[in-house]
Amino acid sequence: MSSTLRASLPYTLALAVIAYVAFSFIFTLPLSAAWAFIAGVLACGILVPLLVDLKGPAKSIDDAAAADISVEAFQGESATLYVGNLPYRANEETVKELFSRFGTVINVRLMKDRQTGRRRGFGFVEVAAADANKMISKLNDFEFQERTLKVREARERQDEENLTGE
């Protein structure tokens, strides 16, 4: 089911009941109750999705604040933090919300297993360099969705030559 239809369905049904009442009691049309209900569903089923599309999606205060601090808008030094022991059900948005409480978040990348596509329980959060130490001190050993996070500054990825010792 599309998000527009899912969002408008309760309104459609409510308006259908109102239309049923209007068609059957207010207007004395020679319609049976079933036809009045069908007319209400059709009228409201067309009207409500059009009104929802015209109005557009509702934005919360958090969405507006997140839109103000976007990747394109950020100018300055950044730091990458390693986040370990993440719950497997956590997604990029929830991690971004958590870290945004303590500063500017530029990007969130959660690692997935290549074969299964399931999350691996760790990721990287790119943040403003000025906020990195505060985030580490506040969120390291922080209880998040019943897991204790491990947060530290990410180290550069080592090349294979360095790993083999050649």
Image: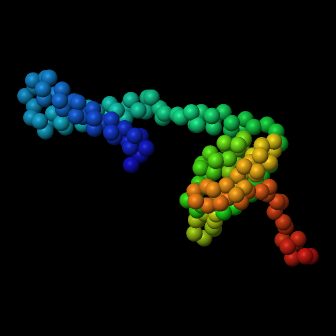
Q: Nearer the viewer, residue 62 or 55?
A: 62
How far across and how far down the image is residue 85, in percent?
66, 63
How far across and how far down the image is residue 1, in percent?
39, 49
Drawn side of residue 55 relative to residue 144, left or right: left
* Residue sitting at x 33%, y 40%: 9
Drawn side of residue 73 relative to residue 55, left or right: right
Q: How many marks?
A: 0
Q: Is residue 122 visible?
A: no
Q: Which quadrant of the view contains residue 113?
A: bottom right
Q: Quadrant of the C terminus?
A: bottom right
- In this picture the colour scheme is rainbow
Drawn side of residue 112 relative to residue 151, left or right: left
Q: Which quadrant of the view contains residue 30?
A: top left
Instruction: Say above or below: 78 vs 54.
Output: below
* Residue sitting at x 37%, y 35%: 49
Q: Is residue 20 visible?
A: yes
How far across and how far down the image is residue 12, in percent?
30, 36
Drawn side of residue 11 relative to residue 77, left or right: left
How far across and how far down the image is residue 40, in percent?
22, 33
- Residue reaching furthest to the left: 30
Q: Nearer the viewer, residue 153 or 41?
A: 153
Q: Nearer the viewer, residue 41 or 69?
A: 69
* Residue sitting at x 33%, y 35%: 11
* Residue sitting at x 65%, y 60%: 148
Instruction: Say above or below: 51 vs 83.
Output: above
